[in-house]
Amino acid sequence: AVSKWENDISYPDILLLPKIAEMLGVTVDELLSGEAKKEVQILPETQRKNINDMMLRIYVNSSDGDKVRVNLPMALVKVGLETGMKMPQISGNEALQNIDFEQIIRLVESGVIGKLVEVESADGDTVEIVVE
């Protein structure tokens, strides 16, 4: 099957694309376009999206093999922070307790997007925070 894909004889079933992208550590967009997204970008004002149209993606991989994927609209994150909600309450993962989400909001409002945070704890847990 892969040989056929590589030789443009056939294409993978669309339902397989998310799994293939996950296995390769890329997004489906990156898989289809063939271009990797930059880790972090600072967009000029003319190219910035409205923060309320953006997504906050949190990826937590525990050393025990657990995976947590949280996708939240930035508008919801802003409201949650304004009401005093903390991210560990949303994700159930304490690895997020030391991350300053208000600072992330300020960065995004100033045009910064991409993978904004990557943390690895002493016990091997990893956390990535991406804004798109």
Image (tube, helix red, strand yellow):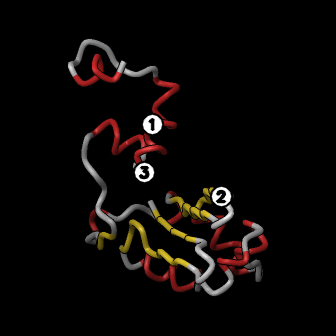
* Relative to 84, residue 57 above or below: above
Image coordinates of residue 8 in percent, x first then y, are 23, 18
Image coordinates of residue 91 in percent, x first then y, are 73, 66
Which label lies toward us, 2 or 1?
A: 2
Asked which quadrant contains residue 49, the reply is: bottom left
Bin the neighbour count of mark 1 within 10 Å (Cα to Cα): few under 14, some 14-19, many 20 and up. Answer: some
Relative side of 34 to 97, left or right: left
Where is mark 3, residue-wise? 25
Which badge, 2 or 1, comes first in the chain's sequence? 1
Where is mark 1, residue-wise? 20
Q: What separation in Å lies between label 2 and label 3 (alpha carbons)?
A: 16 Å
Element under label 2?
Answer: loop
Task: Give the amino acid at mark 1.
Answer: Ile
Element under label 3?
Answer: loop
Asked which quadrant contains residue 86, the reply is: bottom right
Image coordinates of residue 92 in percent, x first then y, are 77, 68
* Relative to 69, residue 29 above or below: above
- Quarter of the image with the C terminus is bottom left
Image coordinates of residue 10 in percent, x first then y, are 31, 14
Kindly identify the residue that appears in the image at 28 percent across and 39 percent down: 33
Where is mark 2, residue-wise? 65
Task: Give the amino acid at mark 3.
Answer: Gly
Which label lies toward us, 2 or 3?
A: 2
Bin the neighbour count of mark 2 within 10 Å (Cα to Cα): few under 14, some 14-19, many 20 and up. Answer: few
Nearer-the-camera pick, 83 or 67: 67
Relative side of 9 to 93, left or right: left
Nearer-the-camera pick, 1 or 107: 1
User: Disc 1 vs disc 3: Cβ atoms closer than 8 Å?
Assistant: no
